[in-house]
Image (cartoon, rainbow, N blue to C red):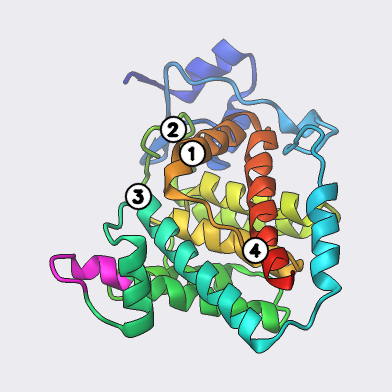
Amino acid sequence: MEYKNISYFATKWNIKERRIRVLCTEGRIHGVKKVGKTWLIPEDAQKPIDKRYRQVNDLFFDSIDFSIIDEKKDTIDSHRPFSQNMTRQLRDKLIIEWTYNSNAIEGNTLTLSETKVVLENGITIKGKPLKDHLEIINHKEAIEYIEDLVSKNVKLSEYDIKAVHYLILKEIDSTNAGKYRQENVFISGAKHVPSVYLNVPYEMQKMIEKYQSWKDLHPVVRACYLHGEFVKIHPFIDGNGRTARLLLNFELIQSGYPPVVIKTENRADYYDTLDKAHTTNNYTDFIKIIVDLVNESENLYLYLIG
């Protein structure tokens, strides 16, 4: 790939060099890299949209009907508190399926039934890597952590996000667990290129600020934005997907919706809609997927309620 300096793009895009330096610092130009004090930009880089003059929210979605899931939520809420047996059944089922699918999406080789055995009995499966077992155990601990955050009505912070990630990678990659990445990365199969690593702390701080501004949005939209914008930054060297899905469910649970399970067999659509959101800011298709999954989780509750 050929790289050009800032002066080349100042002429090509008809904007000032100082503005381009700001865009580079903010991670707004895909594929940019810094050598010493010099910014180098891929020759085929596209001019970013100038957000200084936009009057609409950067992130958007087309009309989506939330009435069905909201009506089901109202019905479920009217039956609270649930019996201990119902609560246990729902939690056990969702934790097993959530843990299995979230790890399987990332390449874990344990089956659903093997995941159940590891979680319930602590037994290792012959012939399966230790890493796969640790991923299962760690994921359950991360779920318990976000449940604790919800029970304490905690306002989500970078510290909490790092803590969730630490639990995901502990004893697997302790060097990077809970720490922002120190190198640039690509997302395999995606058009979107994450922020340069030097910008990750700034981007994460900005994401948390945006998250606070989403409080008036529908909870499912807020959960989708949190998941999507986190993955867009890709702040960790590994474990971003699992952490993002935990954050998604944190927001849903905190808002009184059941957690959702993004199934491994649907990962292609899941990845495609996320990449579309990252490259166009249009979250419509991704939100629709999550609305369908919320509906599916609510049906479990309604079945047990009778």
Spatial distance from mark 2 to mark 1, Cα to Cα?
A: 8 Å
Choose the circle earlier in sequence order: 3 or 1.
3
User: At 81% across and 49% down in the image, what residue appears?
Assistant: 68
Q: According to the image, label 4 marks what residue? A: 300
Choose the circle earlier in sequence order: 2 or 4.
2
Residue 126, percent from left and from top: 15, 71
Q: Quadrant of residue 3?
A: top left
Q: Which mark is residue 271?
A: 1
Q: According to the image, label 2 marks what residue? A: 190
Q: Secondary structure at mark 4?
A: helix
Q: Is residue 14 visible?
A: yes
- Direction left: furthest residue: 127
Residue 257, percent from left and from top: 72, 64
1 and 4 marks in contact (CB < 8 Å): no
| Quadrant (top left/top right/bottom left/bottom right) for the C terminus | bottom right
Q: Secondary structure at mark 1?
A: helix
2 and 1 marks in contact (CB < 8 Å): yes
Q: Amino acid at mark 3?
A: Glu
